[in-house]
Image (spheres, helix red, strand yellow):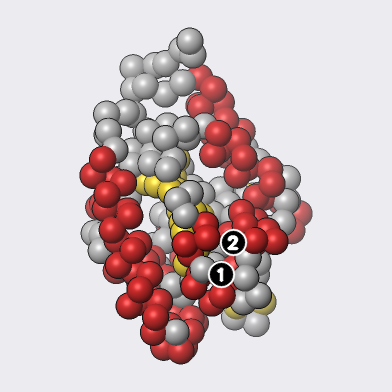
Amino acid sequence: MKQQDDSGKSEAFTDLLARVQACTVCAAHLPHPPRPILRVSPTAHLLIVGQAPGRRVHETGIPWNDPSGDLLRQWLGMTREQFHDVSRIAIVPTGLCYPGTVKGSDLPPRPECAPLWQPPLRAAMPGIRLTLLIGAYAQAYYLGKRRGRTLADTVHAWRDFAPDFLPLPHPSPRNRGWLKRNPWFEAEVIPILRERVGALLAAGDNDGAYLSY
Ligand code: SF4
């Protein structure tokens, strides 16, 4: 049996987080020293996998602390407090560090990051029952060839990925046009998202300790 400290953290979990925090694998390609931004907990039931931190998230160290996060919380029907309850909700983007921008747009997540850290972090959270795949990078990593031809095709086919995954568009202000062109998303998928997340969090035991960075 793994040893745990007073707050319930296993040594293996603490060691893994220390290794993530100390990661410098792609430091040469980042605009700032690495600052992995994630929320993880051995007791989490819901995992949110997005793209990579933007500049504001990098500066504050708080995931989804931007207009994209505001819309995501609106989709989920959650307050900030509920969203940041790390004992229930884990947040591990495809790229953990801010990759910088080019011509005002965020660069893609560093390709080294997801293969390196998604598998061990998921394995350290055995209670995860639903993973929200937000945007094309998260869908590419987790769904691979199972993805549709377009992001809309993938999201529209959400039933094909249940119960483990639910693909969503990125709630970036840049995607407001996509949302207008695809009204079925808010009419059909948002109610499913709220129903599934609500049921999951209501059913989950919330008795564990947590860690976050
Ligand atoms: S983006 Fe990922 S791989 Fe690169 S330094 Fe940060 S944690 Fe390491």
- Residue 212 lies, in percent from the top left, at 42, 40
In this rendering, position of residue 62 left or right of residue 120: left
**Do the numbered discs 2 and 1 sit on residues whose CB atoms are within 8 Å?**
yes
Amino acid beneath label 2: Gln
**Residue located 42% across and 35% down the image:** 127
Amino acid beneath label 1: Thr
Q: Picture quarter containing residue 79?
A: bottom left
Report crowding for label 2: few under 14, some 14 to 19, many 20 or more residues within 10 A (C-alpha). many
In this rendering, position of residue 145 left or right of residue 104: right
Label 1, on which residue? 154
**Residue located 27% across and 34% down the image:** 206
| Ligand 1 is within 8 Å of the C-beta of the residue at disc 2 | no
Q: Nearer the viewer, mark 2 or mark 1?
A: 1
- Residue 22 lies, in percent from the top left, at 62, 37
Q: Is residue 1 above or below residue 115?
A: above
Is residue 173 or residue 188 the one in the foreground? 188
Report crowding for label 1: few under 14, some 14 to 19, many 20 or more residues within 10 A (C-alpha). many
**Residue located 26% across and 53% down the image:** 198
**Residue located 27% across and 49% down the image:** 199
As measured in the structure, the alpha-carbon distance from the residue carrying label 2 to the one carrying label 1 is 8 Å
N-terminal label among 2 and 1:
2
Whether residue 121 appears in this view of the structure is: yes
- Residue 15 lies, in percent from the top left, at 56, 26
| Ligand 1 is within 8 Å of the C-beta of the residue at disc 1 | no
Is residue 205 or residue 12 the one in the foreground? 205
- Residue 149 lies, in percent from the top left, at 65, 75
Whether residue 133 appears in this view of the structure is: no
Label 2, on which residue? 139
Q: Secondary structure at mark 2?
A: helix
